[in-house]
């Protein structure tokens, strides 16, 4: 099972760049790394996905080292509206016989301070 | 307007009663998922379905049941066998289970009294 580990919480001032790292030491060859954002009492929202190296979109960048045992979500110039919980998802892990395992981390609660 | 809907947003039930949570999507996605979230916790997978008439147990399937008779619908039944059913339930869908991102519904908060 591709267990993930993230910091429980982080604080940042508005306008700063925030980097959240997720450890996934036993990631499998076929696993992708996906990050989601969740506001209270809402469903998570997709931010970015990657397999290796660096991926960038209009809201974030994802850095994945060559060994893929960790990944870092980078949010440029955060604002108050970026205050949320950020989840790292690794998978799906093929469990055989047509079944898969999807494992969300416990998430990192990011608080952006004015 | 495409998306994934869950109803109702809040649900109250008495202990010992079965309750069914609705999840509908009009995104033409093959894969659908049910997650449970407890306060301050991450998401735990209950069941998922890769295609119509097929579904697989997730990490915490005990006390839950699902059906996938139509591509658009993936209802979750919380049975009386579920020891601690009060939680926030999230449904999601994706084009496929391998690489595609999941789109989540707004969630149903179930409270068992």
Image (spheres, coloured by chain):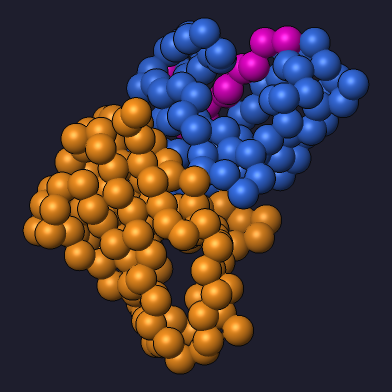
Q: Which chain identifier belongs to the blue chain? A: A
Q: In which quarter of the image is the C terminus of chain A?
A: top right
Q: What residue span does the magenta drawing correspond to?
A: A66-77
Whether residue A10 sits left or right of residue B83 in the image: it is right
Q: Where is residue B59 in the image (x, y as percent from the top left)?
A: 37, 63
Q: Does the magenta stretch include residue B9?
A: no
The hue used for chain B is: orange
Q: Position of residue A97 (x, y in %)?
A: 11, 56
Q: Residue at x 67, y 56 (%)?
A: B40
Looking at the image, the residue that sits furthest to the bottom is B16
Relative depth, front residue between B61 and B80: B80
- At a point 57% along the width and 33% down the height, the residue shown is A37
Q: Is residue B72 left or right of residue B41?
A: left
On the picture, is A80 further left or further right than A72?
right
In the rendering, at what x and y percent does residue B111 appear?
58, 73
| Residue B32 appears in the picture as rendered | yes
The residue drawn where x is 55% and y is 63% is B10
How many numbered dots are placed on residues in this image? 0
Left or right of A109 in this view: B51: left
């Amino acid at each position: 099972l591709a267990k993930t580990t993230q910091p429980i919480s982080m604080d940042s001032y508005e306008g700063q760049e925030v980097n959240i790292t997720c450890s996934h030491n036993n990631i499998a060859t076929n696993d992708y790394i996906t990050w989601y954002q969740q506001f209270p009492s809402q469903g998570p929202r997709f931010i970015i996905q990657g397999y290796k190296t660096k991926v960038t979109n209009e809201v974030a960048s994802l850095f994945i080292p060559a060994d893929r045992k960790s990944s870092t979500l980078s949010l440029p110039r955060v604002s108050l509206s970026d205050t949320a919980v950020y989840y790292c998802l690794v998978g799906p892990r093929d469990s055989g016989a047509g079944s898969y395992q999807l494992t969300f981390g416990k998430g990192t609660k990011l608080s952006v301070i004015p | 307007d495409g998306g994934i809907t869950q109803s109702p947003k809040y649900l109250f039930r008495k202990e010992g009663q079965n309750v069914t949570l609705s999840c509908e999507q009009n995104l033409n996605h093959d894969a659908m998922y049910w997650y449970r979230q407890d306060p301050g916790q991450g998401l735990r997978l209950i069941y998922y379905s890769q295609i119509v008439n097929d579904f697989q147990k997730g990490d915490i399937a005990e006390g839950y049941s699902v059906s996938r008779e139509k591509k658009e619908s993936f209802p979750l039944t919380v049975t009386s066998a579920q020891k601690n059913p009060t939680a926030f339930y999230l449904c999601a869908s994706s084009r496929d289970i391998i690489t595609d991102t999941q789109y989540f519904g707004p969630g149903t908060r179930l409270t068992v009294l």
